[in-house]
Image (spheres, rainbow, N blue to C red):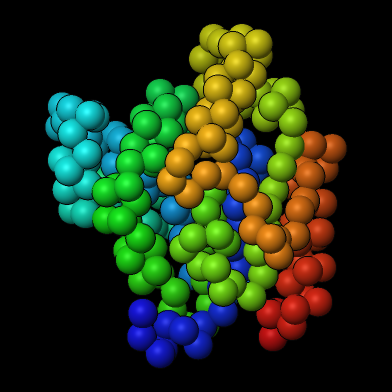
């Protein structure tokens, strides 16, 4: 990484699936006027692209080649949300499905994939600053970040939030099944040998189980102000 990148501050937002990392990271990036990195989407895009190319997931080198050559664009839509293009195709909604999430959990532990995506993620650290959302942003990718946030929420609450999202899209699913999928993914992510999901030693913990989106943002901004990052 060059000196210009090293001078740019970073805020990391880590945590398991469904805790609101992406929402908080976008809010912080907008409030500060900083760049935004949705690192989890890179793994989801790798899994989706590998499936579309009918890659054997047991072939780690082929998976790494897919990761290294992702044709990805991160755009903001007219409502200020995130739009993600894969090979010029809008996959914003598709990569948020449970199926693609499970694909991401399969490719994320692969050392070759993580290495292929490592520098690509570091390249997002540009002036005036970066808010990076993921699972190992504060522990592996940006260990020197000025502020490391780690969001948590109960599996039941995360399943409930996902249930509401799917119901709004007329998708028929049970909370019990969603909760079990959340627990299984947490177990995979926490117990994997490469970059397991865990808070950095100096991370600030925020439990969003009983909090609104606005309350989580205000809590995070308190720490941003304490570190003098909102200048």
Q: Residue at x 54, y 9 (%)?
A: 172
Q: Nearer the viewer, residue 51 or 83?
A: 51
- Residue 131: percent from the left, percent from the top? 55, 66
Residue drawn at (69%, 48%), measured in percent from left and top? 151
- In the rendered image, the vertical position of residue 41 relative to residue 53, given as above or below: below
Decide which of 28, 100 is in the foreground and name it: 100
> Is 229 on the left-hand or right-hand side of 225?
left
Left or right of 139, for residue 74? left
Coordinates of residue 186 in the picture (x, y in percent): 58, 31
Q: Is residue 66 visible?
A: no
Left or right: where does residue 54 sit relative to residue 124? left
Image point 46% across, 63% down: which residue?
A: 141
Q: Is residue 41 above or below residue 172?
A: below
Farthest front residue?
A: 193
**Quarter-of-image position of residue 220:** bottom right
In this rendering, is residue 162 above or below 74? Answer: above
* Residue 118: percent from left, percent from top: 35, 60
Q: Quadrant of residue 97?
A: top left
Quadrant containing the C terminus in the rendered view: bottom right
Q: Position of residue 72 (x, y in %)?
A: 27, 53
């Amino acid at each position: 990484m060059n000196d210009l990148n090293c001078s740019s501050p970073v805020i990391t937002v880590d945590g398991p699936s469904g805790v609101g990392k992406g929402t908080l990271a976008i809010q912080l990036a907008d409030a500060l006027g900083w760049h935004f990195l949705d690192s989890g989407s890179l793994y989801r895009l790798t899994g989706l692209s590998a499936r579309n190319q009918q890659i054997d997931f047991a072939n780690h080198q082929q998976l790494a080649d897919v990761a290294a050559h992702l044709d990805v664009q991160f755009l903001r839509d007219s409502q200020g949300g995130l739009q993600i293009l894969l090979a010029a195709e809008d996959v914003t909604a598709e990569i948020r499905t449970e199926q693609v999430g499970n694909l991401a959990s399969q490719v994320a532990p692969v050392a070759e994939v993580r290495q292929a995506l490592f520098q690509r993620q570091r390249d997002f650290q540009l002036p005036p600053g970066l808010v990076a959302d993921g699972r190992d942003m504060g522990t592996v990718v940006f260990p020197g970040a000025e502020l490391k946030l780690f969001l948590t929420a109960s599996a039941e609450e995360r399943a409930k939030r996902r249930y509401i999202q799917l119901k709004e899209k007329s998708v028929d699913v049970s909370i019990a099944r969603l909760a079990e999928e959340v627990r299984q993914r947490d177990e995979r992510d926490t117990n994997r040998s490469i970059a397991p999901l865990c808070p950095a030693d100096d991370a600030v913990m925020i439990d969003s189980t009983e909090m609104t989106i606005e309350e989580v943002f205000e809590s995070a901004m308190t720490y941003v102000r304490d570190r003098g990052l909102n200048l």
